[in-house]
Amino acid sequence: MLKAYHIIGPSSVADVARLGNSEYPEHQSRIIQELQAKHQAIIHSGALRPAQEQEHSRQFALDRIVGDDKYVFLSVGKRYWLSPDSANFGFLFDAEDLLLHHDAILRDGDLMQDYDDLLDEIVSEYTTSRDPALWTEEEKRLLFEALDDPDAYPDYKSPDEDYHVLCDAIQHQDMAVPYVKEATEQFKRRARHLQSQKQYRGHEAVQMASERAESGQYELLVKDQLPIPLARGYIKGGQELLKNEEAEKTIAEYVQKYDLNRFALNKAIEQNRLPARKSGGTYLIKQGDFDQWYTHHKRLPRKTGLTGSQTLP
């Protein structure tokens, strides 16, 4: 199996930093409990869905402009695993299956820095900006005085203010600011070209990913949602737990785990759409058979909701 991982990240950048600081074990314990609860909630919801913005960030703003906010992200190899190991909760998928049968996209690397560089290049074409190292002593003096006492300098404008104003306006899509529309269209067009140079599909993508499966070089993108039953296993406290396709569960167990309607399961069994074995007063369903039915016959709502996507700096 060509392993693809989706690791659930903390809800804020601040918690990412706290998690990595062993001097505050009480924070680590809290965050790990939150990640574990989120993991269970996602399983119960039935699908991974694209990340929702929890706090404004340049990263999410640019993702939204270029359309990356429509995808669930995974990594081929352990690219986004957290420290400590016990903080890792998530899902294990077969990358080959997703690429060949579920229209996944293989992306060569994280494009966030490329998007940042592209935005800088475009905004610089519309504004005048100089490296702070090239500012005159007078410009530096005025900057620090304005920072120390903003009320005394209500009309202060730094040498690179136009640059930062346009950057912020593009991120917030404030079309009242001059050049935002033109710069945004140029950013979208050039970002799409950048994506086309680093994205692959189908058998070509499988071959590339297989050659560097453990490198963490590649990301997988799945549009709209990724049904949990497609997962080949779970990540719990840093442990990889593969699903047993032959394991049998009762209707009641599936209803509870996936928040299903018992009537829908019974009807699927009666109509021979879901294989099941009668045992006593109930039916037993193999995990593999249930996963196939749930993925192809159960219509998952295409709505925003819980997501396990990373919130990384």
Image: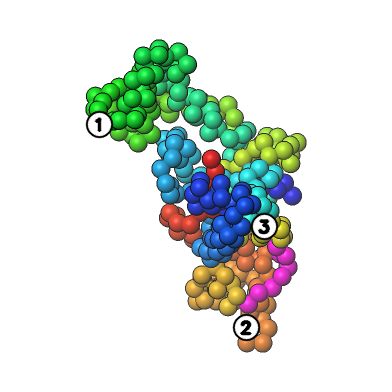
Q: Earlier in the sequence, mark 3 or mark 2?
A: 3
Where does the magenta region start and end? 243-250
- Residue under numbered circle 3: 86
Mark 2 Cα-neighbour bin, 10 Å: few <14, some 14–19, many ≥20? few
Image height of 153 relative to 237, above or below = above
Q: Residue at (34%, 30%) from the top-left corner?
A: 148
Image quadrant in which you'd find residue 86: bottom right
Mark 3 Cα-neighbour bin, 10 Å: few <14, some 14–19, many ≥20? some
Tell me if 313 is positioned left or right of 92 in this view.
Answer: left
Q: Is the magenta stretch mostly helix, strand or loop?
A: loop
Image height of 61 relative to 126, above or below = below
Any mark on residue 226, and which? none
Q: Which of marks 2 and 1 is nearer the N terminus?
A: 1
Question: Where is residue 7 shown, x and y percent of the image?
Answer: 61, 51
Q: Earlier in the sequence, mark 1 or mark 3?
A: 3
- Residue under numbered circle 2: 282
The amino acid beneath tag 1 is: Asp
The amino acid beneath tag 3 is: Ser
Whole-Å distance between the Cαs marked 1 and 3?
49 Å
Q: Residue at (35%, 36%) from the top-left corner?
A: 172
Mark 1 Cα-neighbour bin, 10 Å: few <14, some 14–19, many ≥20? few
Any mark on residue 151, and which? 1
Question: Where is residue 111 shown, x and y percent of the image?
Answer: 55, 32
Contact between labelled residues 1 and 2, with CB atoms less than 8 Å apart? no
Image quadrant in which you'd find residue 24: bottom right
What kind of element bears circle 1?
A: helix
